[in-house]
Amino acid sequence: MTTLATEGGGASEVINARRTESLDAPHILDLVQPWTETLFGRFNVVNIIEKAVLAVTLTNESEDIMAHAAFFDYPNMTDCDPAKWESWMGNLYSSSQCNSLNSLFMHYFVAHKDYAQGCAREIVRTAFNAVPDLHFIFLVVPVGVVPDASIASVFNPMNKPESSKGPRKAAIFVCHRHSHVPVLHIRKARVEDHDDLTPIFNRQSDMLKATYGDFFLAELIEAQDDHMHCLVAEVDGTAIGFMSISDDVNLNLMNECFELGPSHGLRKPHPDDVTSPEPMPVPSPTQPKASKDEVDIDKASVTSQCSKDEVTEVTAGDESGKEAVAPEVEEQPGAKPPKGEGAVSRASSRSGSVGGESKVVPKLSDAQMGDSTHSLLSDSTDQELQMDRPPSTENKLSRPPSSSTPKPLEPPPLSKRFVPTYNGGPNAFSIQLFCIDERYEMRSCDFMPKAFSLFTDYDFCVVTVPHLVPEFPLIQNFVRITPRCPSTLPQELYAFHRSGLLKNFVVRPACSGDFAAVQNLVKNILLNENLLQDLTQYNKARRDTDGTEIQAYIAECQKQIVGVAIIRREEDIEYIRSHYNIEDFIYFNHHRREDHAHLHHLALNPIFSHLTKHFIKEILRLSNKTCLYYPLYPIYSSKETVLRHSLVCSLGTMVPVRARRQIKYPVEQLGINAPSDRILVEREAYALNHINRKLTLEPKVTINARIVVVGASDVGLSFLETFAYCPHLRFNNLTLISPHGLPGEMLPDAQRDQMLPTSHCYSQQDYAKVSLRTWVNVVYGHMTAIERKKKFVVVDGAYQVPYDHLVLCTGQQFQVPAPTGADIDTGVTNENLPGNPNHRLLVEPPKNLYLVNDMYDAAVGLYRAENTLLKNQKPIVVYGSNINAYCCVQSLLTLGIAGNKIALVQPPAEEACFEDNQVMEAVKTALQEAGVQVHSGYYLARWNDQVEIPEEITCATFTSASEPLRLECQAFFSFFKKAVDMNAFKAINDSYLVYDGKLVIDASFHTNDVTIRGAGPLTKFKRRYHADQWTHACFNSKEVGIALAAEMLRLFDPTLEAQPAPPEETLNLIPIYRSPRILGALLPGGYHYLEVKKPGIPDPPEQQMAQNLPSREIYTGEAGSGDGYMKIGVSQYQAVDTVVCLSKKAVPTSNLICLYGVHQRTLNNMLSRYDEGLIRNLYSYFKEAWCTAVFHDRFADFRDEIRELLVTSPRDAKETLEEKVRKVVDEEVGMSDSQREQLLEAYKSTGSKRAVETRLLSFLAYNYYHLPMYAKPGMV
């Protein structure tokens, strides 16, 4: 914040600097002066903003734009190739100091004429502060043009040597850093600096004063010796910053707690170093020495290769060699890992898993070159190995299920975690204390050269930071070290290498002579063969065999190759635009087709990881591209797909792009009016990551807070997705605890998916396109305890997962029902049961009792059914009266099990499974036709005619209101009632969180512990809300998760209003959720079922009739007919609030869900057409071309835009159209015809009608690649 005065000494303005947005363009044009076009030429301002690497806008307190400037990384001269400007300037001006790292060019500048000089100085100062490595800003001035005084006061002509003729068409002006934001002077601290530094320390923290007294700083400075030094930054004779450094570093502890393999344990190489377990060969600890004028960067890079066994936390029997790092998981002292079920193999499908699974799976975005703990193959090696192995050695359970005896689903014995041993001398010093005045904090990096000059024998500087401390500018150049499992330090470790001080970092196109050096650089990277093959192809032909352009670039420092990147021209940009929201980050129409590139490989020495964005910026400049895209495929992808890429180390600098929901087109019906094949083509689903020129100099806010989510429910996943997809935030410690890890990581299996109903929050493709494994660490196991004082969660009774914020969203699962113990021979009925039928079984259940709560359970159940149950003639009992039970019956029938071998036993239900009688009757008829035995109104009495719980069920008895029932049984599938998991209940209850049948929360998701939140069916609202029936189970789970994330983002997002404590509630109202509740399933008879209804608790039919609300229901077809049955409910406000579909044909669910909330008149006057008999089949009606726009993923945004238009007051009107409507509408009387005519006239006369039509045409035109079936103006 700066105060500027007019040049004439008039009124002053307080201004703020921010990044320019495209919406600023109209206001920027208002600032254009006559000299602007003369100096800079005629430009499209939006294009300038879109392509600039740095664009700065100054605003006053009223948010009026005062000035704008755009900076590029090349000069705006037509006769200068952007890729060769450095040599061009060197030849003309003999300037060897300026390079792409420390130079930018001003391509555009405008300012309010009264404040132009002050604005120019402030923008330049902002640019130097925003880019610490920037030292020169150049301005190209055409010949014969005199810069405006505001610019001339900042820029000076460059001095040309006498022999140089200079550019013919322009002169180069320069602005130096030292004139505006000079590099800080760093010196050794003196005791007299105490008085300057103490106020700075006291402003930021009083902890040191409270702990050590008033003169701790003077005493620290006085205690300096050869092992501890104190530095100060000085400006105009005043100390404005302080750093204390010491070589007293506990390297053994750090090696135990962090993955220090790439930095060789922060020690010097030694012949006795043990960097890999037996019998793995130990790589040479030393590298060839560099020449005297070179820095040995390779030695500091990857002198040791971490083996897979080194990072396996609890198991090593998995053939895939999956690694486990990242979240801080500490083993409980003296605890033994539980035996129970193993984690699901993410490369298997139907069978579940027999291979061991890592206890902890790290997120891919932590990947660094030389760190083998992260790789695309860390998730897909198992599949690759199985492809390469002969069939005789293939894992049994990865094949289609056969008649062979299945292996038990248990993990292999646990192996001891390997930790490297380094015996060399220390190679690191640490920062013990650091503080700097906020005005100069962007120059914190100036301390580093002086610090390394005092410890000449050490190559690394390290600093530890508490998790809740925001990442400050000093450590933005440091490398975050991945925590090891287990980590006992409650802090983050950052390291900086001496070579990071070097500024001669050069990026250039690769050449044939680089191959050997690149091969040595990437030798420790998995899939390096693919990188080298692409490099060979580039050197050979510059193109693929199919003609696709390849470009390869090398990063050099001190004549050593430290990085390599390979890109190709993006040939599928139409598909990317139509399937991913890249327009959240770019204006697509301002980028040519050839401006888009596809990143295949990027490897950079971790010493220079702070220059990753600069590396990418240079790749874009040298290749003349503006956008890069990098896909991440799911772990079950084919080997050919995976081998096209290697895991890049730049994921943390890129932004994830959300996938777009696609329209299900009736292609045959549309014919030539269907979208192009580039849009409709079916491709393997992947998650897209992106970076463009605008983002290369835009930093992310790093959040190190440990956020632990318990439960992979729809609520938990949508919460994690919202956090991971915040483009301006980077969460380093997102952790999910789940017994089966992230869903969607098993091989796709339609039959397995059909065994469970779906909420349509996420599908298999959605999981692949979100790719949470990129951003979230996964801990496999059950939460068994919460230590609130020490702030950690105990997993499986053996492992500690520390947290700063804990989110509980375990949901509810089907529990094993406890038999009532009734003896049916005594004539017991449901009226006089000896036990409560609603109780759950608390002892070990029989081994042939199955609960199906997720896809893993479904895979296990189907595998058993196909390999065991199918061959036995005994009946299978399905116990339950809900939709899950019907799905299970249908899955068993589809598997080939005869209907007369299946008994569906339905306990008395509190409410009907289906609200629609047509659906219920169709399902009953289908069960009857299939021969399934259906017994309604029965409670489980005993297994095997005994009170004791048997090891295996052979028969089951049931009681009813009249006659009892006894059934032979080879398997028992239970879908009785859902409840909170017992492990979760004990953990919550024992930690004294308020539990009242469910976890008690407030409207902001808080429990009685401010650091613990809850959401989903696990929770209920406090009793003071007087809404016991209203829980999160009444709403859309994905929307609840997004709302939870929005509440928590207030703690971390600097762009939102901070909320450090829960707000006071005065009204005690529960939040409103608007998204529909959705339920889909495959029911007996092969019926595809879809139900979309409004959130909340439905009113009973008699109450709805008593309210006399003018709602309607329309329907067509019958369940058994070829067209299928479909019903649509319309609310009193004429909006669709219910959709029910039942058909033997596949239903276009994603389309029909979009109908919810849409006014019936938007649907082509649906009610009037139905009344006129024009709609005979609702399925066919909604396949007509006119309806396609309603299904578009941006149609909801378009409706919001129209509403905003109508609530905004026209320039020549005093009141908005909405205000006029509110004046004439009376809910008791209604609207008269004359009033309606007045409103229609106002709608036309105020220009609203024309504006709406214009927006509609713009919507159709902009999304024409999706909607080519609509005519454009001028077509007819």
Image (cartoon, rainbow, N blue to C red):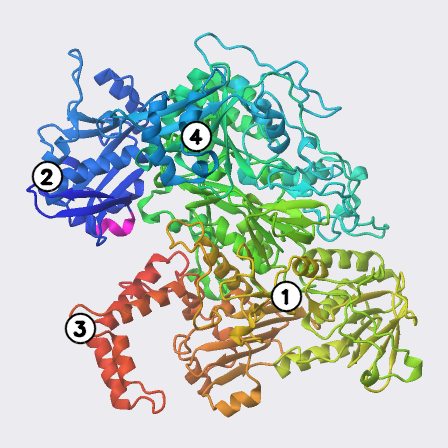
Question: For the residue marked with disc 3, what is the amino acid?
Answer: Ala
Q: Residue at x 49, y 77 (%)?
A: 1137
According to the image, label 2 marks what residue? Answer: 35
| Magenta region | 21-26
Among numbered discs 3 and 2, the one appearing first in the sequence: 2
Q: Position of residue 895 (x, y in %)?
A: 76, 62
Question: For the residue marked with disc 2, what is the amino acid?
Answer: Trp
> The residue tagged with tag 3: helix, strand or loop?
loop
Of residues 802 and 1101, the one drawn nearer to the viewer in this rendering = 802
> The residue tagged with tag 4: helix, strand or loop?
helix
Q: With 1135 as the anchor, is 782 left or right in this view?
A: right
According to the image, label 1 marks what residue? Answer: 995
Please state which of the two labelled residues, at mark 2 or mark 1, is closer to the viewer: 1
View extreme (top): residue: 292
> The residue tagged with tag 2: helix, strand or loop?
helix
Q: CA distance from mark 1 to mark 4?
A: 48 Å
